Image: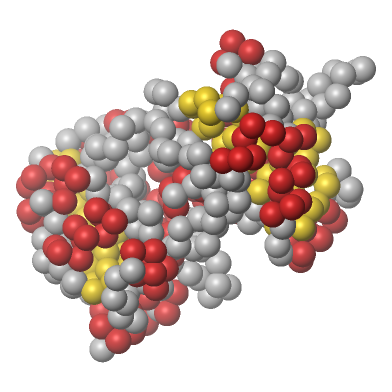
Amino acid sequence: MKVGAVKEIKKHEYRVGLTPNAVKAYVNAGHTVFVEKSAGEGSGYTDEQYTAAGAKIMSQTQIWAEADMIVKVKEPLEAEYGFIRENQILYTYLHLAPDRPQTDALVSSKCSAVAYETIRDRKGQLPCLKPMSQIAGRLSIQEGAKFLEKPMGGRGVLLVGVPGVPRAEVVVLGAGVVGASAAKIAVGMGAHVTIVDIDLDKLEYLEDIYNGRVNTLYSTPENIKDILPKADLVIGAVLIPGSAAPKLIRNEHLPTMKKGSVIVDVAIDQGGCSEASHVTYHDDPVYVKDGVLNYCVGNMPGAVSYTSTNALGNATLNYGLSIAKNGLEKALKQDPGLLEGLNVYKGHITFKGVADAHGLPYTTASEVIK
């Protein structure tokens, strides 16, 4: 198979779909790999390293025109829609539920699009989403702590506090991978942490492992309404795989919150869990609404691109090698978890959460690849 990695064009996106080691793995398996010139520079990899691994350095247009499978990090942007070909395999994060234009473009192209974020492993977990969720969760506290500083527009609060001065109040909405990762860093920095979720088993687990150093709260609209005014930093970490994130933070909540408090909406890739959220970028990551700083960067892990590129490569490589070796249809039939990653197939939407989000027809993935 001809496999291509193009340079990401999303603003301030520094990750790349393939590392030199991944290229070597594809080449050793008998495949041809194309890498766009300078695609890996943002992650610390040179064209020479890719060439040494066996890749051919080519232009963006050449790769899109020749590759059977495009391996990316982020969803294709409007400038790339015209490159996507019928029967071409697109293997990347897609986040289609909040993105109707991209959904329409992929359907119209009649490509086959496999989304990292909905692939499941044998345990039912999301192995290709997990490493980026871990990074985003950990970064959310780092970024939130920075924007709580007064010169950044925040309240001027130190997460850990000092003797005689209370620690910061951190509220984490969601106890999944993002939320647990955020809680880990917040607790480690000495903040006072409350984790909110509807899954009592997750709350019990986190309470146990932190030996009472976190508070847990069952997620209801009333409980969220009551806890937000107490928070210095709120982490939005809710996820419904492949579907739009529920809006837990309402616009009317913001005026009740502390002036200079911070919301980091990690769920922004799936539309955000705050009604006030809209996508921002690393060069201008926050905006103020009702006195609250909103941090809504849609590609948070891109800020730590070396770490993120390698973590993503570790998670996605074997699935990609399976597709390249077997062809897409056979690979999907062999692995039900990979089949769940199929979001669009030759003009059909094959992930229910995406179809429901846009009110479009849905065809099961197993039906279209018979």
Identity of the residue drawn at 34% across and 30% down:
12
Q: How many marks?
A: 0
Considering depth in this image, is 282 or 327 the residue closer to the camera? 282
Write down the quadrant of residue 147 in the picture. top right
> Which percent across, then down, holds residue 317?
37, 58
Q: Residue at x 14, y 56 (%)?
A: 84
**Could you tell me residue 154's position as x and y percent?**
63, 19
In the image, residue 108 above or below residue 369: above
The answer to whether residue 337 is left or right of residue 142 is left
Most distant residue in the top direction: 151
Question: Is there any visible trace of residue 366 in the rendered image?
Answer: yes
> Where, quadrant-wise, is the C terminus in this rendering?
bottom left
Is residue 27 visible from the viewing direction of this image?
no
Q: How is the image coloured?
A: secondary structure
| Residue that extends furthest to the right in the rendered view of this protein | 164
Vertical comparison of 186 with 319: above or below: above
Left or right position of 309 against 59 = right
Work out which quarter of the rendered image holds the N terminus and state it.
bottom left
Does 122 appear above or below 267?
below
Residue 270 x, y percent position in the rendering: 44, 52
| Residue at image location 34% in from the left, 48% down from the top | 73
- The answer to which quarter of the image holds residue 14 is top left
**Residue 284 horizontal/vertical position (percent):** 42, 23
